[in-house]
Amino acid sequence: MSEEEETLGLFEGFGIELEYMIVSRETLDVAPVCDRLLHSASGSYDPEIEQGELAWSNELVLHVVELKTNGPAPSLDGLAVQFANGVGRADELLRPHEARLMPTAMHPWMDPAREARIWPHEYNAVYEAFDRIFDCSGHGWSNLQSAHLNLPFSGDDEFARLHAAIRMLLPILPALAASSPVVDGRPTGILDNRLEYYRSNARRIPAITGRVIPERADSRAEYQREILAPMYRAIAPHDPDGILQNEWLNARGAIARFDRDAIEIRVLDVQECPLADLAIARIAVAALRDLVGERWVGMDELRAWPLEPLEQILLAAARSAEEAVISDPAYLSAFGMSGRSSGRAGELWRHIVEVSSVPGSDDEARALETLVGSGSLARRIARALAAGRDLRGLYEELCQCLVEGRLFGWS
């Protein structure tokens, strides 16, 4: 955000980013044609182009495209439709290339070592630096598609309140959003494999990802001192030209973007259609409003919440999604679920939905009910495969869900 732009306060703007795989229309194998898609839309190989209310951009690898709000949106209202329109436009432009978009957070049978192609155009120096330091040929770099939710703040007090609330909510977001149960052609038993790979892809320099849940930070200065400065020191010997010395190097599950006065939530798997992503964004924002507003727990207690128990809940949710057991009465009470010694993450989300004010369209309400009633997309995929569903046929249907704007399981 430039100095000329008005700084947005808490919940006064929303940024949504959705990443999709580009695959062969015939085989569903990854198709490294993002540059051709952007060129078809704009006539250039610029890494970011405007498409009406949205912007499209490249990512690290050529088989991924990102659709995002073109700057902060004043409301979540109507964004599901805007993203659905963007998906339809991209699908139309990909047809001459015999390609299409595929949803979910990991390609189910991609071989990254053989199929990954790094973006070769503008901004390539950054990607080459990542590849040189971390070797981006594995799943953890070239086969991860996520949804990002960006929320603004104004000043240190708002930053501290929002950061504390996001730290608290992060552990259970994968319980709702997991969509990556299949890797290398088979279910792994883990429902959010994207998060499993994500949290270890920078293990050569642990300061970059930390423990996914960010450390406590109550001001910009503290964040710089405790999170960014150690990360920059750790990467410096591997990055002598300083190419990666930037806030976006931070790979925690939520990162402060002081360049635009926002916090970006990054633990969400992308869903089968934008309607599902926006339903998740709706309930996440509703829960964060309640936490920031101290509905169930005071801000001093929220800020001081230790990292370790949050990390344990996150790991359980990544593995088991809505079936993850939370054996932490204090955590449950922090969301108003008092008097319980333990509970499943799905039960906690049901409780949050029932007690929080969640605006939105009837379709978003139905999508949210599917997520809390029928389980995460990962659970629904795993259930279908266990019942004998063909893997390729199932992901063909998920591609149809994306262009038709419906959740998997809807008739």
Image: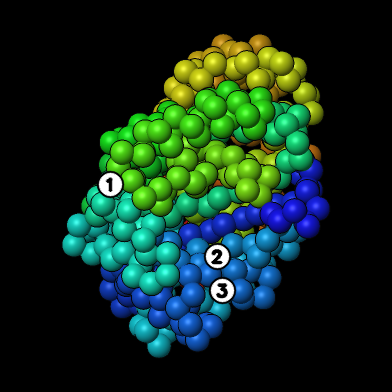
Residue at 38% over, 72% down: 121
Q: Position of residue 249 (x, y in %)?
A: 45, 45
Q: Position of residue 6 (x, y in %)?
A: 81, 53
Q: Quadrant of the C terminus?
A: bottom right
Residue at 73% over, 63% down: 78
Rendered image quadrant of residue 45: bottom left
Q: Residue at label 1?
A: 133
- Residue type highlighted by circle 3: Ile
Query: Horizontal placement of 266 versus 394: left or right?
Result: right
Q: Quadrant of the N terminus?
A: bottom right
Nearer mark to the viewer, of 3 and 1: 1
Q: Residue at label 2?
A: 67
Q: Residue at label 3?
A: 49
User: Mark 3–mark 1 contact, CB under 8 Å?
Assistant: no
Residues packed near mark 1 inside 10 Å, few (<14), some (14 to 19) or many (20 plus):
some
Q: Which mark is residue 403?
A: none
Q: Give the answer, above or below, for where 179 lies relative to 289.
A: below
How far apart, in angstroms, are the residues tagged by discs 3 and 1? 29 Å
